[in-house]
Amino acid sequence: MYPDDRKYTKDHEWAKREDGLVRVGITSFAAERLSDIVFVELPKVGAEVKAGEAFGAIESVKAASDLYAPISGKIAEANAAVVETPEIVNQDPHGTAWMVVLEASDEAEWEGLMDAAAYGEFVASEEGEG
Amino acid sequence: MSEQRARRTPLYEIHVAAGARMVPFAGWEMPIQYGGVVEEHRAVRTRAGLFDVSHMGEVRIEGPAALAALQRLLTNDVSRLAVGAGLYSPMCNPTGGIVDDLIVFRVDDDAYMMVVNASRSATDLSWIREHAAEAAVHDISDEVALLALQGPRAEAILSEASGADYSRMQPFQIASGFRVAGAEVTVARTGYTGEDGFEISAPWGEAAAVWEGLFAAAGPGGLTPVGLGARDTLRLESGMMLYGQDIDETTSPLEAPLSWTVSFDKETFVGREALAEQRRRGVSRRLVGIEAEERAIPRHGAPILGGEARIGSVTSGTFSPTLRCPIAMGYVQREWATGKELEVEVRGRRVPARVVRLPFYKRKGR
C-alpha cells in the first residue's frame, strides 16, 4: 500500500534516497488525516534540520501540524509547488507534493526508519485506536 | 467524564457506513467529516447538507410557572413568543457570565422547549432546576434525535420528503405533525450555518429512517452528509458563537456581540445587575472578527498584539472555504475593537491582521 522505494517515520513522513540526497514528504495517511490542506510553510535552502525536530508546518482547515525531519541534514531544495498550491499535498503526497530535499549529515539515522511494511502495520495500529 | 464510555446517536452505524471519521465530542462519538471539510462546507453553501446533531440536549419546561421561570433564567425576552415561535438567548450567571447559549421555542400555551449545547446539558439541567423550581422541567434529550437540514435546497428537499409546504414558515418558527419516512417529526426553521434550513426532531428510534428519507427525497447528489468539521467553518464564517470557545461563564453577552439578546426591559433576570453595571461602565473587551493578512491561521489561544502589548486572544480561527482566507474571532481590549490594524502570533511569528465586521459571510437575499 505504501511505496517500498522509501522509508517512513512515526510522524508520518517519508524519506527517499536520490543521488546522494534525501527527498522528504508526508504520507498519504497524514494527508488524508489532515484533509483540505491550505498552507504549507517550508524552511529556506541552506537551513539545518535535526532528525525528529520540526522544520516546517502544514495547515489544514481543521488544524495546524508540524513537519518533522526524518533525518538530520541541510535543506538543499524546498518545493515551491506545495507552497503555491497546497491542495496538491492531498492529491499526490508521495509524488509531486514532496516537501524538501535534504543533504543528509548522518547516514546512520537512515537505519532507524521504518520500511513500507513496518509503516503499514504502524498505521493500522493507529487506525485501530481511532 | 473521560472515563465514561462515549455515547452514540441513533445514526452512528449510518455515519460509519458512509465513511465518516468518528471523534469524541462532549461525551459523544460524532462524525467530524465524511468526504472532506471543504467539500461538505460548499455543499451547504450551494445545495444542501444534513447534520446529525442528536447529541444536543432538549429540555421541556411547562406549567403555569414556565414563562416566569424562563424570564428569570434567560436574558432575552421570552414573553414576546407566540405559540410556534422561538428565539436565541444566553442563560447567564449572577456575574453576567454565560452558562449556555440556546434556542427556546414556545410549543404550547404553557409549554416551552429549549435546545442546549451537548457539552452543557448536565450543567444546564441542574442550573434550570435550581432557578425554576416552580415549573416542571423534563430532560427529553434521550427521546429526541435532531437532524439539521441546511442550505439553499433545504426547503425543497424537506417538502419533497414530507409532502408539506414550508414556504410560509418564518425563521425561528417551529411546527409539529409532519411525517418523514413514516416518522412523526417536529420542524423548526433554525440552524448554525448561516444558510436557510431546518432542524428536524424525530423520535430517537426513528432517526435513521428520517435521515434515509431525506436523502431519498433529495435524489442522487442532492444532499451531502456534513460533519462537525464543516459545522465549525460554516458557523464561524457566519459569525456565530461556539460555547466553550468564544463564550463561557467568564464572558458576558455584552462583550460577545450578543447585546441584542439582553432585554433590559425585563425587570429582573439572573445576571441583570452585573450586565446593567457593565453597560453603564462600558465593557473592557469585545469579541471581534479578525482577518489575517498572511498565509497563517490564527487558532484558539493565539495571542493578539496591539503594538508591543498583548491585547487579547483568539477564540476561534479557521480557513474560510468561501472567502479563501484565514478568519478568526477573539477578544480584544475595547480601544482596539474598531477598524484597527493589529498582529496575531502564529507559531511564534507575528502576522499582520485587522479587525473586521462580523459576520464574514452573509447569504444573499437577507
Image: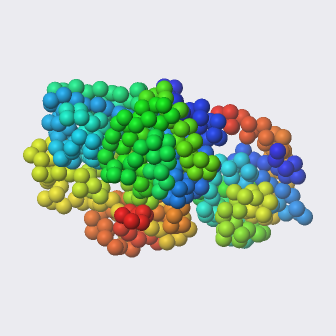
Q: Position of residue A118 (x, y in %)?
A: 81, 39
Is residue B38 at all visible to an observer of this figure? yes
Where residue B186 sits, quadrant-wise, is: top left
Question: In the shown orientation, is residue A22 left or right of residue B287?
Answer: right
Residue lying at 65% horizontally and 33% vertically, measured from the top left: A129
- The one of B148 and A127 positioned closer to us in this rendering: B148
Asked if B177 appears above or below B314 in the picture, the reply is: above
**Image vertical order of residue A64 relative to residue B56, above or below:** below
Q: Which residue is nearer to you in this view: B147 or B25? A: B147
Residue B115 left/right relative to A69 = left
Q: Position of residue A121 (x, y in %)?
A: 78, 37
Q: Is residue B249 above or below residue B46?
A: above
Q: Is residue B68 left or right of residue A114?
A: left
Can residue B56 be seen? no
> Which of the image's four quarters has the N terminus of chain B?
top left
The quarter in which the C terminus of chain B is drawn is bottom left
Front residue (pair B178, A97): B178
Q: How many marks?
A: 0
Q: Position of residue A74 (x, y in %)?
A: 76, 65
Quarter holding residue B308: bottom left
Q: Quadrant of residue B357?
A: bottom left
